[in-house]
Image (cartoon, rainbow, N blue to C red):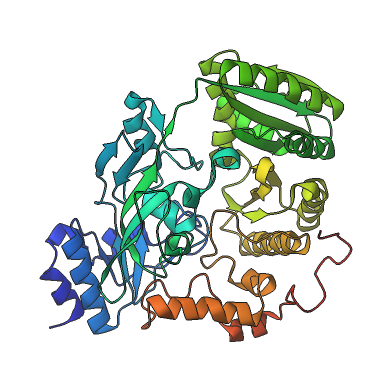
């Protein structure tokens, strides 16, 4: 009996996709520059089906590519031609909402936003909110350790998950973490966050729920200089104010977002800051005054403060719409995800502008300024091979610049296939060896999402990377600490 025949004994016909056209929607994730039709796609609906599928794949030596909603932006869910895409889309139940403990137990295919929608009637919500929260799944959020606008104050996915249930590559069930605030032993719960499907298949997630703040208001500050906006970000955090969100958009991002949804942004600004403050009425009012003063000290030209929930949502609508709005500039965009120390925002954005001019491709910057998580959007036409190559070169140089200033090549999008070369810049050979040993401890046969996240030493040798722990930095003139 062959591989497909063995799967057919486990799954109904509609849950086993073998025809090319049926498999095509699974050929890539949000990083659509790379595509590959997989050997087969499976859509199990029970844990027992997942376990049996994993056993069959192990028997036939077929790689498994776990997949959530496919909204990832690093090629983490890119299939292999000989592989089996294991979609968890049918695992979409909210198992329970525990009001006493303020937790929700959900399956991995539940949409991020659906958790907050279900909890809202109880005055609760789930804090991490990626821009794709209307579509992205909680299992994918764990796999990439996703963040969002409100990560500055409330943390990434790893800070908001208490427990995971997962299946190993050997077909064993593990429960990591607990319903309590801490659990004994090594923190394997954190290890699974950002593991990109390399260590196990997540089948259930327990998340924290928070009370909806009594008040939330947004300040929209306009600046004539990007450097002034960056200084204002540093000033807010230095003052001990931790906004719920602190986002920056540059001139190009402002324009496309305003064209797209008319959020009321000042089109002539070089940059805007969106600073959301939440808490009690007294706390928010006092912090608004303090933030306005800091903006003014840093050459802010105008400030708008939301006076209603509708206005607050309108201000955020432009930020949330910036990515799709880039379609007004070019048919495609390449979203880079690097993180830097806040004090280097100004110099890094200047370098990005220089790269944009050098390669002749527009780059819009819209990002989580409060935690230094950059999201440059490189506009290009994927039908033009030269433009695609130029976009990839700009992206690689931006990531290496992030490492040079003491940052990292990813804040929340993961490594996938996109950043394998830059992993060689970020980490030494010894560190990469440790990552591979961890992978082998969970998946000795190497069947879970192979070829992602951890480059081989031979690849690093071919890339000719200069490790930040040894050789000269790509940008030695920039202070790192």
Q: Does residue 477 sit above or below 443 in this rendering?
A: above
Left or right: residue 273 versus residue 333 is right
Q: Residue at x 69, y 19 (%)?
A: 286
On the rendered image, what quadrant is the C terminus found in? bottom right
Q: Residue at x 56, y 82 (%)?
A: 433
Q: Position of residue 32 (x, y in %)?
A: 49, 57
Q: Quadrant of residue 455?
A: bottom right
Q: Quadrant of residue 254?
A: top right
Q: Is residue 211 visible?
A: yes
Q: Position of residue 200 (x, y in %)?
A: 36, 67
Q: Residue at x 56, y 20 (%)?
A: 280
Looking at this view, name the residue that lies furthest to the front: 184
Q: Position of residue 270 (x, y in %)?
A: 79, 33
On the rendered image, what quadrant is the N terminus found in? bottom left
Q: Residue at x 81, y 45 (%)?
A: 346
Q: Does residue 231 sit above or below 10 in this rendering?
A: above
Q: Does residue 388 sit above or below 216 in this rendering?
A: below
Front-most of residues 373 and 29: 373
Q: Quadrant of residue 171?
A: bottom left
Q: Is residue 349 visible?
A: no
Left or right: residue 417 versus residue 356 is left
Left or right: residue 461 versus residue 195 is right
């Amino acid at each position: 009996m062959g591989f497909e025949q063995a799967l057919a004994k486990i799954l109904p016909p509609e849950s086993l996709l073998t025809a090319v056209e049926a498999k095509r929607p699974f050929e890539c994730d949000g990083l659509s520059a790379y595509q590959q039709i997989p050997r087969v796609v499976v859509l199990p609906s029970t844990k027992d089906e997942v376990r049996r599928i994993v056993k069959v794949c192990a028997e036939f030596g077929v790689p498994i590519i776990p997949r959530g909603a496919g909204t990832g932006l690093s090629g983490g869910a890119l299939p292999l031609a000989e592989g089996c895409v294991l979609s968890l889309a049918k695992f979409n139940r909210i198992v329970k909402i525990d009001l006493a403990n303020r937790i929700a137990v959900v399956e991995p295919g539940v949409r991020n936003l659906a958790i907050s929608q279900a909890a809202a009637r109880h005055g609760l919500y789930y804090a991490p909110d990626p821009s794709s929260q209307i579509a992205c799944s909680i299992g994918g959020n764990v796999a990439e350790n996703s963040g969002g606008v409100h990560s500055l104050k409330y943390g990434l996915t790893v800070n908001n998950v208490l427990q995971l249930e997962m299946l190993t590559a050997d077909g064993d069930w593990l429960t990591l973490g607990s319903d309590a605030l801490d659990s004994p032993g090594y923190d394997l719960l954190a290890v699974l966050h950002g593991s990109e499907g390399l260590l196990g298949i997540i089948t259930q997630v327990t998340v924290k729920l928070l009370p909806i703040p009594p008040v939330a208001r947004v300040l929209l500050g306009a600046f004539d200089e990007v450097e002034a906006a960056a200084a204002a970000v540093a000033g807010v955090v230095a003052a001990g104010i931790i906004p719920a969100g602190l986002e920056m958009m540059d001139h190009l991002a402002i324009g496309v977002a305003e064209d797209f949804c008319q959020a009321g942004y000042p089109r002539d600004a070089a940059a805007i800051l969106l600073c959301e403050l939440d808490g009690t009425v007294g706390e928010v009012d006092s912090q608004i005054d303090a933030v306005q003063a800091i903006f003014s000290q840093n050459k802010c030209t105008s400030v708008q403060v939301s006076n209603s929930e509708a206005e607050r949502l309108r201000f955020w609508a432009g930020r949330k719409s910036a990515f799709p709005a880039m379609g007004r500039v070019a048919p495609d965009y390449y979203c880079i995800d690097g993180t830097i120390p806040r004090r280097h925002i100004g110099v890094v954005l200047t370098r990005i502008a220089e790269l944009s001019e050098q390669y002749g491709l527009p780059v819009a910057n819209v990002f989580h300024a409060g935690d230094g998580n950059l999201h440059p959007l490189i506009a290009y036409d994927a039908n033009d091979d030269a433009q695609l190559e130029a976009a990839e070169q700009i992206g690689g140089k931006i990531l290496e610049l992030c490492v040079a200033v003491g940052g990292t090549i990813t804040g929340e999008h993961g490594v996938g296939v996109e950043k394998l070369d830059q992993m060689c810049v970020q980490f030494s050979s010894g560190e990469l060896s440790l990552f591979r040993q961890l992978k082998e401890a969970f998946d000795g046969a190497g069947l879970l999402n192979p070829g992602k996240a951890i480059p081989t030493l031979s690849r690093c040798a071919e890339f000719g990377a200069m490790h930040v722990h040894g050789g000269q930095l790509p940008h030695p003139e920039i202070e790192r600490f």
